[in-house]
Image (cartoon, coloured by chain):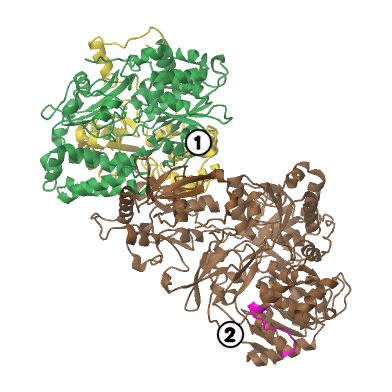
Chain colours: A green, B yellow, C brown
Amino acid sequence: MTPLTPIITAHWDVPDYFTLEGYRRFGGYSALPKALGMDPDAVIGTVKDTGLRGRGGAGFPTGLKWSFVPQNDGKPHYLVVNADESEPGACKDVPIMIANPHALIEGVIISSYAIRANHAFIYIRGEVPQAIRRVATAVREAEEAGLLGDNILGSGFSLRIVVHSGAGAYICGEETALLDSLEGYRGQPRLKPPFPATHGLYAAPTVVNNVETITNIPWIINNGVEWFRQFGTEKSPGFKVFAVSGHVARPGIYEAPLGITMRELLDYAGGVIGGDGTVKFWIPGGSSVPMLTADHLDTPLTYEAMAEAGTMLGTGTPMVFNSTVSVVKAVTRWLEFYKHESCGKCTPCREGTFWITGVLERFEHGHGTDADMDLLVEVCGNIAGRSFCALGDAAATPYPAALKYFRDEFEAATRTPVDEVFPPAASYVFSEVAAR
Amino acid sequence: MAYDESVMAQMREIIERYPNSRSAVMPLLHLVQSIDDEITPEGMQVIAEQLGLTTAEVTAVATFYTMYKRRPVGKHHIGVCTNTLCALLGGDAVYDAISERLGAGHDERDADGTFWLERIECQAACTHAPVMTVDWEFMDCQTPQSALDVIDRLARGEEVVSTRGPVIRDFQATEHTLAFPVDGLAGEGGEADAIMLAGLTVARERGMTAPAPGEGPA
Amino acid sequence: MTIAPQSPTEVAPTDLVTVSVDGIEVRVPKGTLVIRVAELMGIEIPRFCDHPLLDPVAACRACLIEIEGQPKPQPACAIAVTDGMVVRTQRTSPMADTAQEGVMEFLLLNHPLDCPVCDKGGECPLQNQAMTAGRGTSRFEEEKRTFEKPINVSAQILLDRERCVSCARCTRFADQIAGDPMLELLERGAKQQVGTAEDEPFDSYFSGNTIQICPVGALTSSLYRFRARPFDLVSTPTTCEHCASGCSLRTDVRRGVITRRLAWDDPEVNEEWNCDKGRFAFVYTYEGRIASPLVRENGELRPASWPEALDVAARGLAAARGRAGVLTGGRLTREDAYAYAKFARVAMGTGDIDFRARVASDEEAQFLASSVAGMPLGPTYADLDRAPVVLLVGLEPEDESPIIFLRLRRAAQKKGVRIVSLSPVRTRGMDKMDAQWWACQPGGEAVALRQIAENSADTLAALRQPGAVILVGERMAGVPGALSAAAELASSTGARLGWVPRRAGERGALDAGALAGLLPGGRPADDPRAREEVAAVWGVEASSLPTGGRVGQSLVDAILGDTSRAEREEERHIDALLVAGVEVADHERAEDLRRALSDVPFLVALSTHHNDVTEVADVVFPVAVVAEKAGSFTDWEGRTKPFSAAIHGAQSVADGRVLAMIADSMDVTFGAGDVASLRAEMDRLGMWTGARPAAPSVAPAASDASGTVALATWRLLLDAGALQEGEPHLAATARPTEALMSSETARSLGLGQAGSVTVSTDHGSLELPLRIADVVDGTVWVPMTSEGSRVLAIGASHGTRVRVTGGTA
């Protein structure tokens, strides 16, 4: 049984842990002087050696990303933290920002030092003011304590952090759309190349990292490569802030090594509630990754094992659905989301999500046809790999996966409205929720 | 133009945060929304003037993001997540209950213009489903009854506290926070709630800890 | 598509890469986009957002192709070729073919398919590509997206949003090319649409280009909407008659009437753009035309037959031989201007000829003779692209030569060309070109230029760099010493000097000899060899050619019998005038000219429309508008661009032919006067290679501090010009008529921040709204010839001292 390993979350029950004082009481900001005493390249090297992979969904090696930033190029460099957590199912960065903002700030300072950035931005989605005020206040506290600003701790390194509020656009989680948004444009993705590492914010070298990724950094600096690599697997080293949601007895944040299985997480979360007590389908890391079934509960939650199972680890925030749930309805809602959030830039995503949603809504009302089922496969195929960015690919993901495991439900929806087959009230969790 | 000197000073302060003034567009839009309760053509024009942009360039940004409203929102913005997970776990019922009570549908207001109702997308709080927001502050783990209770208390002017945040103020106050996020309220809401502590609690119960090398944040 | 001509030697072999497209290997310059390579090979890849003059955006996804080694299809419009790249287009790759078909299906989902009532039908890229690459039937059964239609994004441009495919060509043009981002993508996702802000229409001087590059029928013009089908139109390549930028255009004619004009591709000049004046100002070609010759009888003009009118004109002009003058205006084709230049000398026996229907001076005439007339090509547009620095002297390109503006803007943005503008006003146009503003009082330009030469080592060093360019605008003719100083600065630094007149025919008229003192080809009229050369071609005795001649004001003075102001004491009276398309109001002393036209004993007018000249003429001949005749214009660079008639079979006659017929009636040997023979003569003459007169060395005028404020003025691109008449939608997009002043000047005059001001001279006053702007102190700027602001009519021009008071006079 893989044990839980509270690290980032270890002190979240401390009433003032989100303050500078509380964070410092448990060793906070002890990694900073250590890092500032290292050569920036050594910091990059350490992060590279840990094999830390981006926790925002794509899993790109963080140290490698940092090493792409050209040095001594005479240009300003920027670190931009992607705190636009908006993917359906993803709910681990917002808790980190609310409960542990100073670890994020400490990580930002160290990471900025490594990539020689004197200006960092934390782009937080606008719909979470509590996370925004906690992070912004943490920045203010750190400034007042001399941990931010000019000549930090006498190191000669200076850094300003700006907390930037978004305004409601899932697409801004795409790193180049985020940069355009941060520059004051519509948040539409940019053509790559050039990549942000050389032409990012204000056309200067820029690293964009996820909140959880950056929050890992103080622990890595303090505890070293070997300590970090004892968690997880060779290709998926480290620990992960998992967020388990859906039809489980105790939804919430579970921090554990990568490689833990869904069955183990379910056990910690008190098992499946409602329906016949089994998992009908679950999604390992956000609606953009293909769904899995009860057959995959023992597959390790690692980048590589999830890929082998035909899905992705994504954000590592599993959503669990019980037997009462209509997969047709679930997929329709996700597609409505992608249609609402498509930025409009490219044809396949803009028009494709519009089309699929219309057809799925017919299925929901029992008016799908057999031909529609094949048509949707084709339409998804015409989006996947042809859209400008990954949002289109994501939108093309839920339906084919759902069809693969639950074709019969779509067939039924050619005759009967889904609410008749799956009465919505059966899925509600109000009695459990009222007790929380 | 409609804004007084204190607002103009706040605009300048926001603009100064950024190496490139255009980056200030979004916080400036939050600021004017905190004053006007919506994004008005005049508000966009003032921002355009401050940043040396055309009003069309500001309009292009303002119309891209869902949180900028082009009709007055009213005192409170009520969001109900009806994305898949929240909807299935009861969000649809919560939404229907509120909609019926307010006599308003998606992106509509109740008769006296106090509440704006919106089906919102995933709020990064799936562990706390079904999720509602009041002026974008979390009102987690709702049932139709609890949600209606919140609406009723707000309507009566009673104090309502966010489940993970401060006492509910109003829509415009939150918009001001988004422009000036150090709002003195970071201490509200306290430590992580039981759901955020779920794993830590189980770990404690089962005596699980991460191997620590003995220094730093352990 | 625009591909600048490129000789093979321009690309070093090391910069070539080998790529394979559909199995065919080609060598192309490294970095060429795949879609361009395919074009060069004749392989057509579908595209909507791609435009060779806009930055790649890869948004529409219509051009997806396969690149070996890439798992997903790639946008051909955004992928630069690398050595060894293997590309497969839809012709050889099922992956590319399926991807393109899928995108085409998506594009048509929400498209209304209203081709039968759409202006674009018949020339529509979406329609064409749907026919070649689309499915026969739609699989889309849901409800289409609809919008309220159409909306005006400006008075001229209409938008049917449901037709839009969100390719963003129009918005990118507005932002990247014109620098007028008032047209933007609004909303998001499936609701994304093109639009403007409330109360901020897309009033760009270049707005019409968006219609042309729209790959569907989403953008249309008020002027052309629902007027014609493309296949009913007869198209002719033409050269724009509206300014000296030299744009290549395409003129589309339906049953003898122009229905629209498009920018045509000239990579060396306008690329694929033009301004809205060139595009939309053509209603004059069919409205208010003079139908037949007119002869004055008992004080009234009456229609006359051609033989009668020719006879009256011939007798009148013959009687005044040697005592006659010619005013041609700046709008003639090069061939017609040459006909006047020749007719004046051989038929009228006079050298008194001037093409400058505007503020002009003897200093300018000397400057033109020394530095411009008959000179070879250059500086050119390409020189602007390559220049280390471009100094603008009294020239506002966005208003006065819009293609120079576009070229300079791109040069500054893409190539870092430094632009400096010596001007009394910091304009929006300067900001769009990232130009440095050198503030200068109107009238103070000569002194400012001399100060550069004397005190500004930095600037001198910049101008000494190879390729530096100085461009002077036509308003410098009214500033004593300015052209002298510009010529001096150019010759002392080695910078190339370009003279940028506004009107399309000015440079051609100058080269053709339609200016006293100059024979065709820039030949000095007093140079014996020059006279011999011209006399030989004209078949006359060299001795019969007049030597000098009077220009501009002296000519008017001669008619009025007032020679006190004339520099040369030539007592000859003017007893007859031959006047072409001249607006009296364009002259510096319009009232004097008006009086002279009334006073002169015999006046012949050749004109397309009635105006102040025909009103008092003794004989009026109707002539062809530019669109009805062949000819050529020489642009500011000195580039001659010939064109043929766009309107075939028009009954009208070109000026040159009319002059030939008059000459015939006078028994003067002149030639046929048709374009071919006029051109042949000009070609035989060629350009002067001999010595030229010295550049002028006029001293700057002493600073005149009398009055209160110096007046700065130039003509806005869209104004009260005669050729813009009859097109209210175009006029509605013009800049507002307003006075500009610095806040300091307004304050010192006791004026508020806004409200209206009265600008007055002893001859009249103008009342305009005041706007505070970046204007050099002690100066007021007003538009020169706009409705409500006719500066010349109050006896003022650039540099005049005026009084400015608040409110109404």
Disc number placed over residue A350 in the picture, else none:
none
Q: Quadrant of the C terminus of chain A?
A: top left
Identify whether C418 is placed above or below C382. above
For mark 1, name the chain.
Answer: A
Q: Mark 1, residues whose alpha carbon is within 10 Å: few (<14), some, or many (≥20)?
A: some
Mark 1–mark 2 Cα distance, whole angstroms, equals 64 Å
- Residue A330 position in % (x across, y down): 21, 38
Residue A30 in sight in this render? yes
Q: Amino acid at mark 2?
A: Ala
Looking at this view, is C5 or C158 the one in front? C5
The residue carrying mark 2 is C291
Q: Amino acid at mark 1?
A: His
Residue C485, position in %: x, y?
A: 80, 54
Residue under label 1, please give it. Answer: A199
Q: Where does the magenta region start and end? A: C665-677
Locate residue A138 relative to residue A302 in the image: left or right: right
